[in-house]
Image (cartoon, rainbow, N blue to C red):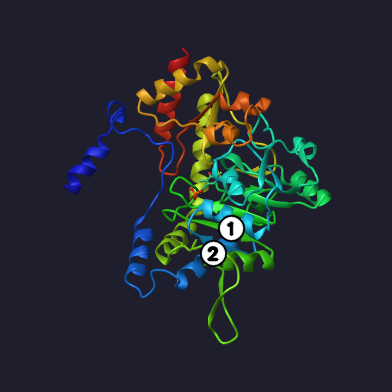
């Protein structure tokens, strides 16, 4: 049975791709990952054991940060970071509309007000030159998102933050393994948030983390992760803050630890595949490729093309889908979702964001993707525009 399955996969051709499409992203799990997880299942500690700490220490070391706190998801990590930052009702936080909704949803969860800044049309990150005009006396933080794994212009953002006394909390859910001017993402802003969902750089199934160099934030994050409970001087549990249970299991942490060892290899593979896209698509006149700005290493989370004739974008997506290619849409503008429209963002549009979100198409990108699949995908794009 298993053998039969294996032969079938080997014999997969273009024709069968229709039945078994290429996803836009997926995890890469090896025998070593499986062994590590099994060893935890056989141990005494499924949660609150030694693996979480080991994972956190490795993660902090990898990113060049002092502290890491592993939690149950990237969304939980954002929530805890915003709580640890002390955001209060009506505080304003400047962020990008080109992100997964969790970035600003968790601001709403702490009753802060997301203020959406327009994006750049070369790498689709928030436009650092448009931030300052949005700063008011209520602004408390900037939340840049390193879209598609491409780091934002952190020097400009950090100097703005310094000038106006704001915190910088990076949503780096796309960007574990990326660097900005030779510094790994994770050791740059006041706090940096990662996700370990299966489509991200490494996976723990579900999971996330907050990295920081600030001991006060670190201690607050630890407290809030686990009910706000700490030990008093007699060793008894006391609840000091209103916390959550955002803990991650040792099973997940062990998977994360094992995956982390392979992260650089994953990033290298993603970068080679991206080069494949640039090579194959450079002469296609009907589309725009993302620009990789100087002094950065992208984590290569997703690969975006933009269709010049926006009227053709949905037709292209349908055509690629019909050819077994798992295209995706990253992202509709956060402010355009019905919930946002009904809760204070009615009528908001930002020029570049509107252009971007009506022309973007996400193509598959993940470490197990074959270069031949990239050639197949690019051939289909060329066929569509012929
Ligand atoms: C994935 C993602 C999140 C949420 O992470 P989860 O682990 O899925 O909760 C937040 N922000 C961005 C930009 C993401 O891509």
Which SS class for mark 1? helix
The residue under the point 56% across, 67% down is 57
Side (left or right) of 109 relative to 351: left
Q: Residue furthest left?
A: 1
Q: How many marks?
A: 2
C-alpha distance separating marks 2 and 1: 7 Å
Q: Residue furthest bottom?
A: 234
Q: Relative to 292, is 110 above or below?
A: below
Residue toward you, 285 or 129 = 129
Q: Are marks 2 and 1 in contact (CB under 8 Å)?
A: yes
**Does the Cβ of the disc 1 residue fall within 8 Å of ligand 1?**
no
Q: Relative to 375, is 153 above or below?
A: below
| Percent coordinates x, y for residue 100 in the rendering | 54, 40
How packed is label 2: few (under 14 Cα within 10 Å), some, or many (20 or more)? Answer: many
Side (left or right) of 93 relative to 22: right
Residue toward you, 373 or 199 = 199
Residue that mark 1 sits on: 80
Which SS class for mark 2? helix
Q: Is residue 64 visible?
A: no
Residue toward you, 378 or 159 = 159
Residue that mark 2 sits on: 225
Q: Is residue 377 visible?
A: yes
């Amino acid at each position: 049975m298993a053998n039969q399955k294996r032969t079938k996969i080997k014999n997969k051709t273009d024709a069968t791709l229709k039945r078994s499409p290429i996803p836009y992203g997926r995890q890469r799990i090896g025998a070593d990952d499986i062994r590590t997880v099994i060893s935890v299942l056989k141990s005494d500690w499924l949660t609150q054991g030694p693996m979480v700490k080991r994972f956190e220490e490795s993660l902090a070391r990898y990113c060049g940060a002092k502290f890491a706190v592993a939690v149950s998801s990237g969304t939980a990590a954002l929530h805890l970071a915003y709580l640890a930052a002390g955001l209060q009702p009506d505080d304003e936080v400047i962020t990008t509309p080109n992100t997964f909704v969790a970035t600003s949803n968790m601001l709403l969860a702490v009753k802060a007000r997301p203020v959406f800044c327009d994006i750049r049309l070369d790498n689709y990150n928030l436009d650092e030159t448009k931030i300052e005009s949005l700063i008011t006396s209520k602004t408390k933080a900037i939340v840049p998102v390193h879209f598609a794994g491409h780091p934002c212009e952190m020097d400009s953002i950090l100097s703005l933050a310094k000038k106006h006394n704001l915190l910088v909390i990076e949503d780096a859910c796309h960007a574990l393994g990326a660097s900005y001017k030779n510094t790994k993402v994770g050791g740059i802003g006041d706090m940096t948030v990662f996700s370990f969902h299966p489509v991200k750089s490494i996976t723990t199934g579900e999971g996330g983390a907050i990295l920081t160099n600030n001991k006060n934030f670190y201690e607050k994050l630890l407290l809030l992760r686990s009910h706000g409970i700490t030990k008093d001087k007699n060793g008894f549990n006391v609840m000091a803050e209103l916390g959550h249970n955002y803990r991650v299991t040792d099973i997940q942490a062990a998977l994360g630890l094992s995956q982390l060892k392979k992260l650089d290899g994953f990033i290298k593979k993603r970068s080679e595949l991206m080069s494949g896209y640039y090579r194959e698509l450079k002469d296609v006149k009907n589309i725009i490729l993302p620009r990789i700005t100087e002094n950065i290493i992208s984590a290569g989370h997703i690969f975006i093309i933009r269709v010049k004739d926006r009227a053709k974008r949905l037709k292209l997506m349908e055509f690629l889908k019909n050819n077994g290619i798992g295209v995706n849409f990253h992202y509709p503008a956060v402010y355009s979702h019905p919930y946002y429209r009904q809760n204070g963002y009615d009528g908001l549009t930002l020029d570049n964001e509107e252009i971007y979100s009506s022309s973007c198409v996400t193509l598959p990108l993940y470490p197990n993707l074959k270069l031949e699949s990239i050639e197949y995908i690019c051939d289909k794009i060329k066929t569509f525009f012929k």
